Amino acid sequence: RTPFVREARAAASEVRFDGWGGVVSEAFREYAFDPYTEKTGVKVVDGTFGGGDEYLSRVKASQPGGYNIAHLSGVFDYARYAGLGLASELNEDNIPNLKYVIPKLVDVFRPITGGKISCVPYDYGTTGLAFNRKHISEDEMKEKGAKILLDETYKGKIAGWSDWRTRIWYASLQTGQDPNNATDMDAIWEAIRTHRDLSLKYWTSGAELMSLLAEEEIYVTEGWSGRIYALQEQGHDIGYMDPPNGFGWQECLFVLKGSPMPECEELLNFMLAPETSIAVAEGQNYPPALDPQKVDLGKKIPTLPAFDPTGTLAGLTFADPEYWNGHEAEWSKEFGRIQKGY
Amino acid sequence: MGWSLIRFWTFLVYIFMFLPVAVVVLLSFNASEFGAFPMSGLSFRWFVELARNEAILRAFQTSMILGALTALISTTIGVLASLALIRYKVPGQNLISTILIAPILVPEVVLAVALLLFLNALSINKSFALLLAGHVIFTLPFVILVVQARLVSIRRDVEEAAMSLGASPIQTFFSITLPLLLPAVLAGGLFAFTISFDDITGTLFWKPGGVETVPTQIFAMLRNSISPEINALGTVMIALTVGLPLLGLAIARRMSANSGG
Amino acid sequence: MSTVKLTDIEKRFGDYVAVHRMSLEMPEGGFVTLLGPSGCGKTTTLRMIAGLLDPTAGEIQIDGKRVNDVPIHKRNLGLVFQNYALFPHKTVADNIAFGLKYRGVGKSETAQKVKDALELVQLPHVAERYPRELSGGQQQRIALARSIVIEPDVLLLDEPLSALDANLREDMRVELKRIQERIGVTTVFVTHDQSEALAMSDQIVVMSAGRVEQMGAPQDVYNTPGSEFVARFLGASNIVEARCTARDETSIVLEAPDLGRIVIPADRGPQVNGTGPVKLVLRAEKLALSEDKPSDGVISHSARVETVDYQGQAARYFIRLGELQLQAINMIDTHPHGEGSEVSASFRPSDCTVLPA
Amino acid sequence: MSTVKLTDIEKRFGDYVAVHRMSLEMPEGGFVTLLGPSGCGKTTTLRMIAGLLDPTAGEIQIDGKRVNDVPIHKRNLGLVFQNYALFPHKTVADNIAFGLKYRGVGKSETAQKVKDALELVQLPHVAERYPRELSGGQQQRIALARSIVIEPDVLLLDEPLSALDANLREDMRVELKRIQERIGVTTVFVTHDQSEALAMSDQIVVMSAGRVEQMGAPQDVYNTPGSEFVARFLGASNIVEARCTARDETSIVLEAPDLGRIVIPADRGPQVNGTGPVKLVLRAEKLALSEDKPSDGVISHSARVETVDYQGQAARYFIRLGELQLQAINMIDTHPHGEGSEVSASFRPSDCTVLPA
Amino acid sequence: MGVEAREARQPWILLSPALVAITLLLFVPLGFILVYSFWLRTATGADVAGFHLDNWAEALTDRFYRDILLNTLKIAAITTVVCAVAGYPAAYFIARSNRNKGFLLLLLMLPFWVSYIIRTMSWINILGVSGALNSLLLWMGLIDEPLAMLYNEATVILGLVHFLMPFMILNVFVSVDGIDQNLESAANSLGATRVQTFISVTLPLSLPGLAAGGLLCFVLAAGTYITPLVLGGPRDAMFANLVFEAIITQLNWPLGSALSLMLLAVLGALVLVYNHFLGMAQLMKGMG
Ligand SMILES: Nc1ncnc2c1ncn2[C@@H]1O[C@H](COP(=O)(O)OP(=O)(O)OP(=O)(O)O)[C@@H](O)[C@H]1O
Ligand SMILES: Nc1ncnc2c1ncn2[C@@H]1O[C@H](COP(=O)(O)OP(=O)(O)OP(=O)(O)O)[C@@H](O)[C@H]1O
Ligand SMILES: [Mg+2]
Ligand SMILES: [Mg+2]
């Protein structure tokens, strides 16, 4: 081994955290990292990424221990990391704040990693339908649901996320299938093609989603609940609706294999502390994973879309990781082709 | 094809080149976050927020340092290589030139991943040095292109004169060649700096923990929304880059005037 | 001040031989000019002496010491180039002081030497200027000052005057010679301009295609060219095919078409042995044109002026003499002979040179 | 073939006046040379005639027609530049044929004309080469061929020979003049080389700082310079401060330091009126040096040779005569006077020119 | 040791840092990519080592890749042509303007110094439904409804042209700047009008610069992926997007490697052709 090599275990004087930039990382730094460093003397090195896929490729190309904790998109990413052998094993006793978390959110992870968990849930949201109220009425939305995205009258004023799961999920809804167990893939691909031909653009980021809607380039698209809320906050007349079986998801704080576990667990605990969670949630407009029955979430959070005051999340449909990850390679490639006009 | 027509056309080309820059500047004074036209009001709000935003300022600082170091190293290596290619007869000159240009032929994603794989195979962790090395590699061709073009115009006999007067080759390089090459070195360095400063793809892959540059900062904001503070930063940058190069130009003019043209 | 000695030096570039086994000895304090047409190897020779090129074979000695392996910056030479090669980013004073820096000369001494050098080249007032603020002739003088201030063992000059325009060139020629004589440094001067070579040198080395054609004092080379090449290259010469019909100790008898029988002193044709075809060389300025019959002792033929090239103090005429086209350069009083006029063209046999055919 | 007439033309670049109200008439078929030092406005004048620059004021006529507003491509001129300006991407034949294309000349006729032009410049075998494959002199001849093949009304040449080296330059000079005479085209030639101007021109226009200094046939300008500037610029001249002490119809009486009293024919000083300080101009080649006392009718002083500049057929001497330093260019027989030798320097008063101080 | 032996050795000393850096940081890693292209991706995302030709078979035979590659080359070609046509007169103007050459060139570099993403996204504010151009046209009464101008192949090309124009102008500038103006005067004097002079003299002589600029534009255009993402419509993907998706989205590095080597081969072949006819030296010259 060359002298350049930094051993993971010897690096316990610092922990690496990667997440979304902007308001999110600012909130983390203020409420979690700084107090944590003050308390433990362990430094938090924080990095950012622009997308989960990009982050995963970086992790894949790096040494074990090069990355520690990441703010990842929910269950299927969890399964992918586990599939690549990147899952660690958390000692839940070291994370007392886990008790505030909605149990349903934690439980979905357990079967993937044999009862243990490598992450803690952090926030959740939905990918619903966003529409411009000037041009499309609530009633029309109610009536057409997901099919509004296939409506000829809005040709050129429709958009969609360039994510293959979301596309297939909504195509399932449009073809009347169970999004977690579609049987007629041909119909789904056809719906995706139809949507593609009506669309102005596939957006790739929240920033694009917001500007497309705000500048009235498009009238309707799916959208992330938090982003649409941000638009509404700024006074844009944008409506948001979760169609039946709308796409719910959660995000987690994932600890990668090869990380200094005690330090990471302690940091997770800090991050789960209600004031940290709430600050981050208010910043990005996604409700925290904390159970509203156990924790007072303040004023703003209950107004966020997708927020479930009961803490059961019964109204949300989450993706079944086994189903989605089982088809990932095949479907993502197929969508890649359809997206490009094939 | 009258001269005035060409002038007008050039004017249009410049307008075209400046449109996005103008938008960035305008938006940085826009009161609201979205919707540039019509502007909802004039405000210095984003500048104030920029001044308070430590993360962006830190990223800016990192970008500046990274750009400066990249420029320094890339220019040094590039000047040496250019010297070799222009000053000496090297067998396989054309091939070597092609090799030195190769980094701009490889798609950046590929270069980024390839380099990571290589380091991984060597069990070397990512570090600022890697990021720097990556930037050096893909700015190098541009530096070499610029410096070579200038180097041909520096007369060999000036160097020979210096040696005949008793300066060793190294002393000659530092007292004669380098000062004469300075405008090109500055231009090449500026090029390297700009390209490094503006790079996203490579930087995303190579940056170690805790290091953010302005582009990666912007990239990470994409999920939520790009804050107009970035526009303010752009405006500041443009103000600087219009100001500094003008200053640099004045210096370069002096230098090249000194070098006798 | 030192001697320079080249022994059998040769320079090849790949297969091409730029300089063929050349041997030369340059006397201490002498002004030796390498003269020859473009591409004959003058610069190559000079650069070998300077240490900017390695000879492929042979030995170079400066002051009796072999210097083949001494790098240029240790040879203690003064080198002046056609384009001056002043350092554009340094003032005149800094240019001149440059070489002193590497000789450990102290500050005040440097200042004094720079001042002296500037005075020597008669430009005491330009010390603080930059090279671009000087005229060509001034730049050339500064280049010279820069190379002599280090008191070189040998001064090497590669066409130092050719970038200057006619009037300036003549002035600088005088100036350069004056300075060289004053400091008495051994000098090797390269030029392709014969008038420069004639005006300045103690010794001229005429080169052609990498070989030495002739070597000697200017007047000897000029008056007694050793080959047709030298005759043609140094000034305008008439070269006429002739036959040597007889020769003895004191004279050579030639028979030339249109010129008839000419008896030439034997020392004008040292290379000619026996009889047979030869070449008769007559310099253009030794062929006098006049309207009246000339005096005795000269050979005279009538000819017709075809072209006149007026040159101010002189004129160059192209005349037809039977089948021959000859040229003549004559001083003129006020008006040259007109084109088409009939003149008598005369020359002294002792002004001719005879070369083997 | 046409006349060119400039009337009061002026050219300003911003505030700088490059050419001051200049009037000139160039005769049909004549060879007129604009001669002057660098920057005096020669090129500017030529470019105005060519139509490459607009005169700020004044009128240009070619063949009696005002052409100020005629664009260059309609002026039917031949233009030859110092650096030849051959099209590097076209063969020699295509270069020459270039101008014919725009004159609607048919294919076979073009081929014939190109062939003729190549023969005229004595390069019939290079038609298929590219310019870079020719020597400098050959390129210059092709440039000439290209400009004359279109049968221009006027041929304009801007220092066409200055990029060539000495021997070649002299040959091309003769060649160029021969061609010009053969086709008889009105020619304007720009140079700063006086010997070129003297050798080639029917008429010389000496310019200085944007103004015409003197104008006339080469021998007139050379023998009777109209100003000190012209005297200095055209060849080596001695200029001595003197006083005019008396003058009448036929002669001017001068008193010059070291030279004493000199009586000069009145027509050698047409510009001098009355008495007072004047300048005495004596060409270097009119000052004869000899070891014996010269004949009558000349003024003679003893002097000492300080420097000798050997030039082959002639030598240039710098001599000291009392306080004066003079130069003399004399033809030499075999050996020049040695440096330091005492000679007698003599000249005829009728060879002097007197100018106002 | 003689001066020439030293001169023969010195360039290698000078070149070694650059060559070592490029070998280590570019060619050796590319070797990894080559090896990777023969591996296979499994369903979980892990890769199996080995010598499999599957990726190459897919990359080379599937119409999908060929079509997009061709489309990419088409877009790069159009971009190059637009840059050339629009940039040439500007470069000519700069080269032939007596003053301010340096300043004009510097201004040209300015947009480079605004972050690429921001710069690209700015077009949305210019060409969007509520962007500057539509606002202007509406205000002038030229249109009643905002025009949909964004998100098609044209906007992708527009973005690329904006990015690459300076490279083209710089190259052409150097070439035109090096043309002796006397050549133009000579052509004029021989009877060619300005247009004829341009076509028969100036243009052919500036071809090397035009070609160098063209090569640079083409190569850089063919390798972009952000511009089509931001400014393109659903179908406007370019080949680098495929590489990006294979490597990043699908985590299929073996396929991504094969694809990127394919692109590299095509671009490399282009450079070789260029090198054969015009030489890299011109490209060098073009950047000055
Ligand atoms: N580095 C080189 N490689 C190959 N050939 C060379 C080199 N340097 C000079 N030559 C050739 O050697 C010959 C002599 O060149 P050199 O420069 O000595 O000529 P020169 O007499 O100085 O001519 P000029 O008067 O034109 O300067 C020429 O034919 C030239 O082409
Ligand atoms: N385009 C221009 N702008 C400003 N000044 C100019 C321009 N062209 C020429 N000049 C100035 O006009 C004067 C005359 O220039 P011109 O080129 O006619 O000189 P010249 O007699 O041809 O000199 P040379 O022998 O050096 O060619 C010079 O002082 C020159 O600097
Ligand atoms: Mg030479
Ligand atoms: Mg001129």
Image (cartoon, coloured by chain):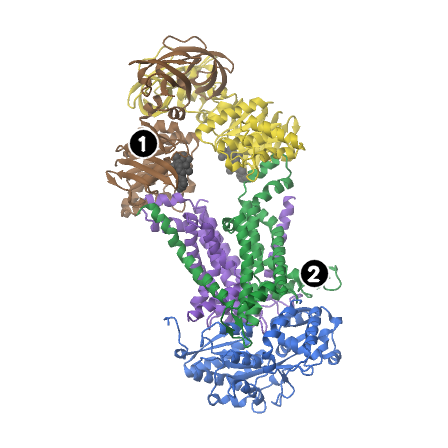
Chain colours: A blue, B purple, C brown, D yellow, E green
Q: Provide the chain ID for the residue under circle 1.
A: C
Provide residue B157's location: percent of width, then percent of height: 39, 43
> Neighbour class for label 1 at 10 Å: few (<14), some, many (≥20)?
many
Which label sits in the foreground, 2 or 1? 1
Q: Residue furthest left?
A: C64
Residue located beneath label 2 in the image: E136
Secondary structure under tag 2 reads: helix
Q: Is residue D180 left or right of residue B39?
A: left
Q: Which one is nearer the viewer's eye here, D343 or A240?
A: A240
> Neighbour class for label 2 at 10 Å: few (<14), some, many (≥20)?
some
Q: Amino acid at mark 1?
A: Val
Provide residue E270's location: percent of width, then percent of height: 55, 54
Residue located beneath label 1 in the image: C32
Q: Is any atom of residue E100 visible in this view?
A: no
Count of numbered circles in the view: 2
What is the number of the mark on residue A215? Answer: none
